[in-house]
């Protein structure tokens, strides 16, 4: 459970929720769950959504209720929170280095199905040793670099060489390939995103075929994100999709364009930072109680939700600054101290990591409270 008390209680009106708070609009959230399930139902791929977005086992279980096979995590601490929260199948879609982390990872495999990625033969040896001490067999995927320029060995022969090292390790099982093109997720133009993923698909297919020719079958070929998953789903190469942000969305994803050149609208904004006007000393300025410690701005500033004539223009540690226009029809020059507003985060994942609780709302009232138990899990 989260260490702090929630900023709300079940049944209270939304307007009574203390701020800053992280709101989930349950109707929009549930529509997003269904839309993703519907979007991939005719493909050969299944969903393994990324829990680094929500960091909450309750959300992961709801994703599994509509067809997800499990979840992804980036950190061992996240994986531990998921397993303790009832998630039975977790892929750590990242490299895990260091004895304390490896010991904890291997111990988790006694309680749930655990897989992890590797791109280094020495790390594979360390994974094997940790699995031996824990008395488990770990599934290990080779991560290949398909264009993101981050982790991963080169596709083709280097991937084969590492897969053979894994296959020969007595306490490991070769699990397949991790082939995530993260840098493609926010390429704004549709054709640009498509081209980047077509290149990733080609490299992944080449590697899958090479491994198969050497007797190594890929149980998992994983990747994809909210910005590109339709391409990977249709590829016939990827069999697990790791999209995460689709459940909530954020301002940054809203700048991606679809094939018609319009902003993508496959999913709805369902997550909001709830904030209070704490100062209103001039006609064109309102100050909120949500600043850099309540909102991540690495991908841009948040957007006020359904407030005409108001723009979020800056943040300091504990303050968010709104510019209020008098010239916009239907504008909100009447904002006053004590009024509450919803903000669409610029980047959802690091914003979620600042909170202990989701305040889940429906029909103007708090319906549930979900602890963000993997919040702050950096190891």
Image: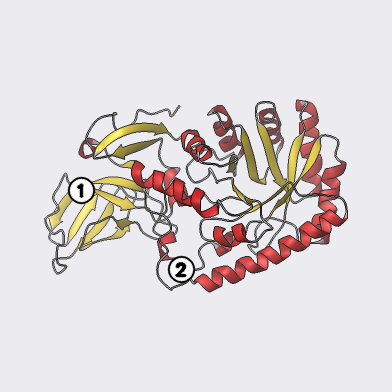
Labels 1 & 2 near each other (Cβ < 8 A): no
Residue 225, quarter of picture: bottom right
Q: Nearer the viewer, residue 236 or 196?
A: 236
- The image's mark for residue 160 is none
- The C terminus is located in which quarter? top right
Q: Secondary structure at mark 1?
A: strand
Measured as percent of width and height from the top left, residue 248 is found at 42, 49
Q: Is residue 3 above or below residue 293?
A: above
Is residue 370 shown to the viewer in this render? yes
Quarter occupied by residue 145: bottom right
Number of the front mark, 1 or 2:
2
In the rendering, at what x and y percent does residue 36 appear? Answer: 49, 51
Please name the residue shown 58% across and 59% down the image.
Answer: 182
Which residue is at 85% across, 39% downward?
Answer: 169
Q: Which residue is mark 2?
A: 258
Along the horizontal axis of the image, is 183 left or right of 219?
left
Q: Can residue 376 be seen by looking at this rendering?
A: no
Q: Position of residue 291 (x, y in %)?
A: 33, 50
- In the displayed structure, does residue 314 sit left or right of residue 152? left
What residue is drawn where x is 72% and y is 51%?
177
Front one among 16 and 113: 113
The residue nearer to you, when weighing 223 against 1, is: 223
- Coordinates of residue 199 in the picture (x, y in percent): 66, 68
| Residue at 76 percent of width and 49 percent of height | 218
Q: Tell me the quadrant of the picture where the N terminus can be found.
A: top left
According to the picture, the residue beneath numbered tag 1 turns out to be: 277
Horizontally, residue 163 falls left or right of residue 358, namely right
């Amino acid at each position: 459970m989260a260490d702090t008390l929630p900023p709300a209680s079940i049944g209270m009106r939304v307007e009574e929720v203390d701020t800053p708070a992280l709101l989930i609009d349950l109707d929009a959230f549930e529509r997003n769950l269904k839309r993703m399930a519907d979007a991939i139902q005719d493909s050969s791929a299944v969903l393994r959504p990324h829990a680094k977005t929500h960091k909450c086992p309750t959300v992961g279980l709801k994703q599994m209720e509509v067809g997800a096979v499990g979840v992804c995590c980036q950190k061992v601490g996240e994986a531990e929170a998921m397993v303790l929260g009832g998630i039975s199948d977790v892929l750590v879609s990242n490299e895990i280095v260091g004895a304390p982390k490896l010991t904890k990872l291997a111990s988790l495999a006694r309680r749930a199905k655990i897989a992890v990625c590797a791109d280094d033969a020495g790390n594979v040896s360390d994974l094997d040793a940790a699995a031996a001490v824990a008395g488990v067999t770990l599934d290990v995927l080779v991560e290949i670099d398909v264009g993101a320029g981050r982790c991963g060995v080169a596709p083709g022969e280097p991937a084969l060489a590492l897969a053979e090292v894994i296959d020969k390790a007595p306490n490991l099982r070769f699990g397949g390939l991790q082939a995530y093109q993260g840098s493609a997720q926010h390429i704004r133009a549709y054709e640009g995103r498509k081209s980047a993923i077509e290149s990733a698909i080609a490299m992944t297919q080449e590697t899958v075929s090479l491994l198969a020719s050497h007797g190594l079958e890929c149980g998992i070929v994983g990747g994809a994100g909210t910005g590109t998953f339709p391409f990977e789903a249709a590829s016939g190469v990827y069999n697990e999709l790791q999209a995460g942000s689709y459940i909530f969305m954020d301002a940054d994803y809203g700048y991606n364009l679809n094939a018609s050149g319009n902003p993508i609208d496959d999913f709805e904004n369902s997550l909001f930072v709830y904030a209070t006007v704490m100062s209103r000393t001039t006609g064109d300025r309102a100050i909120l109680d949500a600043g850099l410690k309540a909102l991540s701005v690495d991908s841009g500033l948040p957007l006020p939700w359904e407030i005409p004539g108001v723009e979020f223009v800056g943040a300091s540690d504990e303050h968010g600054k709104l510019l209020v226009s008098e010239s916009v029809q239907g504008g909100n020059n009447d904002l006053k101290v004590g009024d509450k507003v919803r903000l669409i985060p610029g980047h959802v994942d690091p914003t979620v990591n600042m909170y202990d609780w989701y305040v889940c709302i429906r029909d103007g009232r708090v319906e549930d409270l979900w602890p963000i138990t993997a919040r702050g899990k950096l190891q």
